Every structure is written in C-alpha cells, then in structure tokens.
Image (spheres, rainbow, N blue to C red):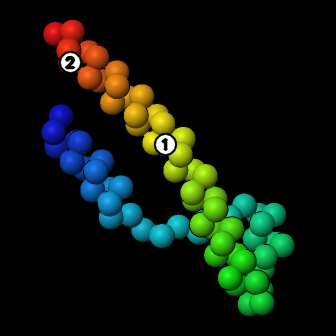
Amino acid sequence: MRKSFLIIVFSFLFSCAAQAQCAMCRASLGGDANKVQAEAVNDGIVYLMVIPYLLVAGAAYAIYKMKKNNK
C-alpha cells in the first residue's frame, strides 16, 4: 500500500509537460504568430483538468481514512 502511494506521489511531482489542445483550439491558434496564446490556452486546459483530479483524490483519501478508523 505504501509503495503504490509513493508511486502516485512521484508521478504527480515528476510529470512531463503535455500539449493539451483540442482540434478546434489547435486549428484556431496554429501558426507562429499565436505561440504565446497557444501556450496560455494549454496552461488553462491543464489547470482546469487538475481540479477534478484533486477533488477525486481528496474524496478517496477521506474514504480511506474513514475505513481505516472503523477497523
């Protein structure tokens, strides 16, 4: 159990940069002139994706603590 927890923590700390654009965003922001705007859109998409994962992780941790306290 501890080993899987450490793997999850390290995967969050040492992650690779991802290009998170949908096809429509990529088409509208394509080209060299919009490079800064494209990076801003990528950052915004990644930011919006992080929040649901944190909520699910928090709920899973709360359930884990409740089950551990019942034993």
Query: What is the tally of numbered marks visible in this picture?
Result: 2
Q: Where's residue 45, x and y in %?
A: 64, 59
Task: Place residue 40 in its image quadrant.
Answer: bottom right
Res 39 label = none
Disc 1 on helix, strand or loop? helix
* Above/below status of 6 relative to 61: below
Q: Which residue is mark 1?
A: 53
Kindly state the secondary structure of the residue where label 2 is placed.
helix
Mark 1 crowdedness (10 Å alpha carbons): few <14, some 14-19, many ≥20: few
Cα separation between marks 1 and 2: 22 Å
- The residue nearer to you, when weighing 10 against 59, is 59
Residue 28: image location, x then y, percent: 84, 73
The spot of residue 47 in percent (x, y) is: 57, 57
Q: Earlier in the sequence, mark 1 or mark 2?
A: 1
- Please report contact status of discs 1 and 2: CB closer than 8 Å, yes or no: no
Q: Quadrant of the N terminus?
A: top left
Type of the residue with mark 2: Lys
- Residue lying furthest top: 70
Amino acid at dot 1: Tyr
Q: Residue at x 16, y 43 (%)?
A: 3
Quarter of the picture containing the C terminus is top left
Q: Is residue 67 left or right of residue 56?
A: left
- Picture quadrant of residue 70: top left
What residue is shown at x 52% (from left), y 50% (from top)? 50
Label 2 crowd (10 A; few <14 / some 14-19 / many >=20): few
Q: Quadrant of the rendered structure where residue 61 is?
A: top left
Give residue 26's position: percent from left, percent from top: 75, 71
Give the residue pinned by disc 2: 68
